Amino acid sequence: MNAKKRNSAIAMAGALALLLSACAAPPAQAPSAPAAPAAEATTSTDPVGQIEGQAKESAVEAIMTAMPATEGGSAARAIELAKKHAGTTLNVTYESGLQPQDPLLFSGPEFERLTGVKINIIETPFPDLYSKAVADHQAGGGAYDVISYSPAWIGDLADGGVLETLDAFIDANMDKADLDDLHPTYRKFQNWKGKTYGLFDDGDVFVMYFRRDMFEDATNKEEFKAKFNRDLAPPKTWAEWDEVCSFFSEKGKADGNYGCAIQRTAGNTYMWFYDQFRSNGGRFFDADMKAAINSDIGVKTLTDMTNANKNMPTGVEKWGFVEVLQAWMDGKLGMIITWPPIGRWSEGYGLDAKQLEWVPKTQITGKVGYSVSPGGHSELAGGFNLGVSADSKNKEAAYAFIQWMTSPEISGQRVKIPFALRDPYRMSHFNDPEYAKLWPNAAEYLKVLQEGAETGVADLGIPGAREYEEALDRAITAAYAGTDPKAALDAAAQEWNAITERIGVDAQKASYADWQNTFGVNAYP
Amino acid sequence: MILQPRARSNQHSGKYALIAPATLLILFIALFPLLYSIIVSFQNIDARTPVGTFVGFKNYHDVLRDARFWNALGNTALIMVVCVLAELVLGFTLAQTLVGHLPGKRFIVPILILPVVIAPLIVGYTWRMLWDTQYGPINQVLGWIAGRPVEIVWLANPATVWPAIFITEIWQWTPFMFLVLLAGLSSINPEYREAAEMDGASGWQVLRFVTLPLVWPVMAVAILFRALDAFKVFDIVFALTNGGPGTMTETVSLYAYTLGFRNFRISYTAALTFVLLIIVSVAITVLWRRLSANEEKLA
C-alpha cells in the first residue's frame, strides 16, 4: 500500500471513527489526561540523552527538574516572593495543544513544589487567548491571573485595561541583568507606550529550512547551473526561492516530491506576506495612516505568493502547519519556511517523547540546513508574552510565576524541553553550550535563530492588530482562490482604513509611530 | 357558594401573587437580554470601550452599508435555498419509497437518520477530512473511477467549495426531512390512495392530487423548520472553510460570531443581529403565507 493510499485509508477510518464516536454515548466520566511522570516523558533513545557526559536518565531529569536557582537571581527572588502566597492557585491561560505540556508536566509542578503556589492551566485555541482575556475583563474579570498572549496584541490588551503594568514588580523583584540577557529585539516586545505589560517568553521566528543534500548533489548543481546560469545555493531573495523551488519541483513532481511548501491555509498566511512584503520594501501605512498594503509592492508581493503556489504541492492553499510538517519530515520537500520547532524535530530531537508521538518520524536527519527567510528578514511571527491580568486577585503571585518562568535558568531549561514549543530568546539561550550539543548542527541552528532575531521583522503591533491581520488574511486566501491580487488587496486596504477610522486616525497614527520607533529596523529594515 | 365581589377580588389577587414570581423570572430571563442588547446596539461598546456611549443609529446605518454583511446574507440565502430544496426532494423521495411495508425497514430507517444525531461541528470536521485534496477518500474514489490521480482542491477553489458545502449540509439534514415526511405520509389513510387508484388515477395523479395535499401541512412545517435552521448555518461552514477562501462562503452567523466574539465589536454586532432579525421575520412571514396559500391551493 503506498503512502497516499494508506493516508487515504487512515482519513476514511478517521472519518468513520469520528462519526461513530459522535454517536456513542458519552463516557460517564470525562477522561482525564494522566500527568505523565517527568521521567516518562522521554524514552531511552531520546536525543536528550545525547548530551555529552551525561547518562540518559540524568539528562532527562536535569531538564525536567528545575535547576537550583542562583542566589539573588530572578528565579530565586521569584520563589521567595511566591512563597508568601503559598496555597494560592493561579489560573494561567495557555495555547491549547502541545504548549501546555510544559506547565502541566514541568514548570507548573516545579513551581508548586518550590513555592506552594498551584498552577491551573486553562487551555484555549490561539485566537481565543485574546478574545477570552478581553471577554473576562469586560465581564468584570478575575477568571485569569496570568495571560499568555501574542505581543502583537499588546496595544489592544494594554489600552483595553486587560493587562497590569509590570514595571513596579520588575523594579522590586527582578535582577536587572536578566533584562539585558533578553535578545534586544525580543526585549522590545514587552513594552507598550513606555510601560512593561508582559515578560517575553518565546522566540518565534521564521526559519528557512533546506535540504542540504539536495543542494550538494552534483547532478542537481550541474542541471541548475545549465538552466539558470548560476550556482545552486540556498536562496537569498524571493526570486531565487521561486527559481530553486520550480527547479526541484519539476524534477521531483512525478514522484510526489516538490521544491518547496509554505503553509497557505487561512489563519496565519498573512505572516508570510508581512515577511515578503517588507523584504520587498513595503510599508503598512502611508504618512496619513492610509493603508498601503495595496501599493505596487503589496500587489507584487501577493502576485508572487500566488504564483509561487504553482510550484508547491497541489492543494497547498489548504495546507497548515501539520501538512507542511508531514511532507517535510517524509523528505518530500526541498525547502520550507516555518517556526523553529520543525528544525529540532527534523533532527529527531525529542521525537521519542510521549507528547511528540504524533509528529511524523523524520527521514531527513543530518540533511537539513538553516537560513533566515530569502529576503533576509525573517518574520518574528507570533511569539508569546506572559502578562498579569489587571483583574487578578493574586497579582504578586502571578508576577512571581512569570518572572520565574522567564528567568534565565528556568527558561533555559524550558527551551530545551522537546515538547515545550518554546524557542530560544535570551542571549544565554543562544550561547548555551549544552543546547549546541543537542544534535550535530544545533550550534548552526542557534546561530540562525539569533540572526533571525537581529534582522527579523516584527508583526504589526498596534491596536486593532488582530483585525488588520484577519482582513489581510482573507484577502490573501481570496487571491489564492483566483481573485485578482490588486482587487483583493484593495478590499483589504478598505477594511484596514475602516478599522483605523473606528479606533481613531490620530490615535492610530501615534501608536504606529510609537511601534516604528520602538522596533526601528525590526519594523522596516 | 356565591362569592362576594371583595372575596372574588382577593381570590384573584392570590392567584396573581402565586404566579407572579415565575412570570417575573421568565420576563427577566427572556426580556432583559433582549432589551439590554437593544440598548447596546445604540452604543459603541468594543474591546477598547467596555463602557459605551450613545451613538444613535450609527451602527444600524453602518450595517446597512456593510458589503460584507450583504455578501454573508447572500451566501446564507444560497445555502438555505439550495440545501432545503434538495433535502425536500431527496427526503420526500426516500419517504415515499419507505412508507409502505419494506423488508428490513426497521434497520434501514435508523441508519438513514444517523447523520441528524451527529453534532454539525463533528460532521463538518469529518467531511473536511473526506474533502482533503491529498488524503481525502473522495479524491481517491474519483481517481479510481477516472483511472488517474484526481487532486481537486475542493475547499479552496471557488468552483468546488460550494458543492462541497451543499453536499455536506444535505448529507446531514436530508434525514430530518425524510423522517418528518415519513411520519406525515404514514399518517395518510391508505384508503384515499386506493380509492383514487380504483377511479383510474395514475401514479402521478395520486401523488399530485391525493398525497401532496394531505402531506402538505407537515411538509410546510418541515420546510419552515429547515429553512430557519439553514439560515443559522454556522458549524459546518466554520469547520469546512471558516467562510473562506476570503469571504466567499461566509454566512451571517459566522460573520456575527467573528465580529462579536473575535473582534469584540459588541454594539455593532448587536445592531447587525437586530437587522437580521427584522429581515428573517419578514422573510419567514412571507414564506409562511406562501406555504399556507399553497396548502389552500393544493386542497
Image (tube, rainbow, N blue to C red):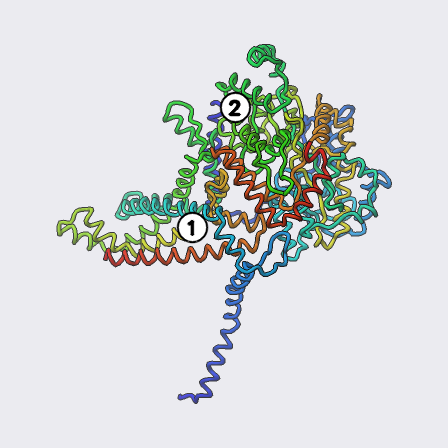
Q: Nearer the viewer, residue B91 or B80?
A: B80
Classify residue B162 by image quadrant.
Answer: top left
In the image: residue A267, left or right of residue B147: right
| Mark 1 residue type | Phe
Tell me where residue A70 appears, x and y as whole percent: 84, 38
- Residue at 48 percent across and 57 percent down: it is B274
**Residue at the limit of the structure toward the right, as seen here:** A71
Count of numbered tags: 2
**Residue at the limit of the structure toward the front, as seen here:** A288
Q: B10 above or below B219?
A: below
Q: Nearer the viewer, residue A446 or A330?
A: A446
Q: Chain of mark 2?
A: A
Q: Quadrant of the C terminus of chain A?
A: top right
Compute the Cα span from label 2 to label 1: 40 Å
Which numbered circle lies on residue A287?
A: none
In the image: residue A295, left or right of residue B9: right
**Which structural element holds mark 1?**
helix
Is the residue marked by circle 2 packed among few (<14), some (14-19), or many (20+) residues within 10 Å?
many
Is the residue marked by circle 1 packed among few (<14), some (14-19), or many (20+) residues within 10 Å?
many
Which numbered circle lies on residue A311?
A: 2
- Residue at 20 percent across and 50 percent down: it is B206
**Which structural element holds mark 2?**
helix
Q: Chain of mark 1?
A: B
Classify residue A301 by image quadrant.
Answer: top right
Residue matched to label 1: B231
Tell me where residue A146 appears, x and y as whole percent: 70, 48
